Image: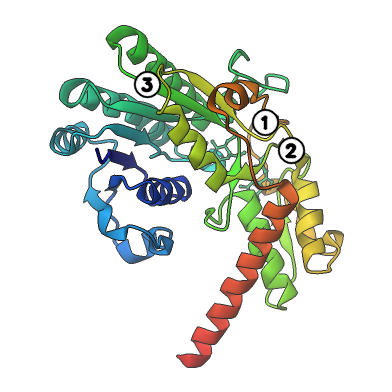
Amino acid sequence: MQKVAFITGVNGQDGSYLAELLLEKDYEVYGLLRRSSSPLHSNWRLDQIKTGRERLHLRYGDVTDGVSLRQQIEEIQPDEVYNLAAQSDVGISFGVAEQTAEVTGLGALRVLEAIRAAAPQAKFYQASSSEMFGLSAPPQNEDTRFHPRSPYGCAKTYAHHVTVNYREAYGIFAASGILFNHESPRRGENFVTRKITKAVAAIAAGWQDELRLGNLEAKRDWGFAGDYAEAMWLMLQQSEPADYVIGTGEAHSVRDFCELAFAEVGLDWQNYVRHDPKLKRPADVDCLVADASKAYQILGWKPQLSFEQLVAEMVRSDQQLLRDYQLNSLDG
Ligand code: GDD
């Protein structure tokens, strides 16, 4: 029988890859959209989906509005619910700590409550984050102690705990995917990888002279977002709900990312990257490296794209976007 999925945060990077994957698997997909004054622009990622678009249904709602969640879930009666909605920018969370707690933390609780009330048989996926590990030494796995370093990390830690609690207290099939950083050409420009690849394309084209960055020493385990969407889906196909760490097991610094991205266009990063102390966070996470052996064994999941391929793909995509923009400006 055809399956029905409900995705909050459907128009984000992960939401778009997950929707694409589920549509390819013949799901009926419902996505929750926050109303915005520029709806066309906010759906640019979904516009890239080619297969099964007629089975993608967008509904207005909000994870800060429990009534809207309950109404949607009651009406849709999903088999699977993926909670990807979040205020997901770690740096910004220091400035909007309360809103981050509302959306990223309590949002998960509201989705779980809606499931409990209106579709208790639905399987639930919570988008947890390696930011929950924060200061704990790498490599990090499902047993590593949480020590979040930002209001975002604290909110995600709450959401993770409440997911486990609703699994234990109410028997909801609630899985928590503790995903390490995952990037793609659909990444938002506020995150460091996309900020770098966009700048590399602009510098190579002579449109920009320098790139200002904060902490260059931070190390992250960067994978490809498309691969991680597959892991989310696999978690809900298991017979029992559980927590899974998802990552590549390889760490690279922001400096390494710059070096590789600039080298893609034949430039030396040191001639363009400037350190800007204003971009440093009040507290940062030094090093995240996944030990994803549980996911490798139980889910049979493995990342497909290498770090080098990911960087090259993101640079190529930003160069293409710039060329398209130039062509459109000429046409206009
Ligand atoms: N955003 C940003 N901008 N980060 C910078 C900059 C800059 O100009 N300069 C240095 N950095 C450093 C940050 O201080 C951080 O140590 C590292 O680059 C990565 O920053 P982000 O790309 O913003 O990602 P993040 O690791 O903080 O969080 C991302 O990954 C999490 C999973 O671990 C986000 O996608 C989170 O939503 C996600 O949960």
Residue type for callout 2:
Ala
Sequence-first tag of 2 and 3: 3
Residue at (60% x, 79% y) in the render: 323
Ligand 1 has an atom within 8 Å of the beta carbon of the residue at disc 2: yes
Count of numbered marks: 3
Camera-side mark, 2 or 3: 3
**First in sequence: mark 1 vs mark 2:** 2
**For residue 148, side relative to residue 116 (left or right):** right
Observer-side mark, 3 or 1, equals: 3
Q: Amino acid at mark 3?
A: Ala
Residue 176: percent from left, percent from top: 46, 24
Location of the N terminus (image quadrant): top left
Look at the image and tell me whether residue 159 can be seen. Answer: no
Residue at image point 29% right, 49% down: 33
Gap between marks 1 and 2 measured at Cα: 7 Å
* SS class, disc 3: strand
Classify mark 1: residues with Cα within 10 Å, few (<14), some (14-19) or many (20+). Answer: many
Q: Is residue 7 above or below residue 109?
A: below
Report whether the residue tagged 1 is closer than 8 Å to ligand 1.
Answer: yes
Residue where numbered disc 2 is placed = 218
Image coords of residue 159 (percent x, y): 41, 23
What's the CA distance linking mark 3 and mark 1?
Answer: 27 Å
Q: Is residue 112 left or right of residue 262?
A: left
Please give the name of the residue rendered at 37% of the width and 34% of the height, measured from the top-left corner: 83
Q: Secondary structure at mark 2?
A: loop
**Which one is nearer the viewer's eye here, 15 or 284?**
15
Residue tagged by mark 3?
174
Label 3 or label 1, whichever comes before in sequence order:
3
Q: Callout 3: few (<14), some (14-19), or many (20+) C-alpha neighbours within 10 Å?
A: many
* Label annotation for residue 143: none
